[in-house]
Image: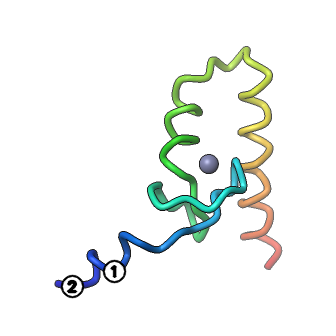
Amino acid sequence: MHSSTTNRFVEETCIICEQPKLKGIHLYTKFICSDCEKDMIQTDTDNPKYRFYLQQLKKIRNKEIYS
Ligand SMILES: [Zn+2]
């Protein structure tokens, strides 16, 4: 198993902050960096930021549906 050693250095663009990041999770075919993932979990649903996160996430699902 050598794949994990190469994957470590691959930057992927986070769909929330739209920055290239090394660490994060995959949702469908898209990538969310660990910073945004933590932020999303900690953000209260009353926070306007939460709506922004939801909007960014909707963007993924729509792309998945219509592509
Ligand atoms: Zn991010």
Kind of residue sitting beneath label 2: His
Q: Is residue 48 left or right of residue 12?
A: right
Q: Nearer the viewer, residue 60 or 17?
A: 17
Q: Quadrant of the C terminus?
A: bottom right
- Marker disc for residue 6: 1
Ligand 1 under 8 Å from disc 2 Cβ: no
The residue that mark 2 highlights is: 2
Residue 4 higher or lower than 27, as above or below = below
Q: Is residue 24 left or right of residue 57?
A: left
Rendered image quadrant of residue 30 = bottom right
Q: Is residue 32 left or right of residue 5?
A: right
Q: Which residue appears at 57% of the width and 65% of the height?
A: 28
Label 2 sits on a secondary structure element that is loop
Residue 4 higher or lower than 43, as above or below = below
Kind of residue sitting beneath label 1: Thr
Q: How many marks?
A: 2
Check the image and name the residue furthest to the bottom. 2
Label 2 crowding class (10 Å Cα cut-off): few <14, some 14-19, many 20+? few
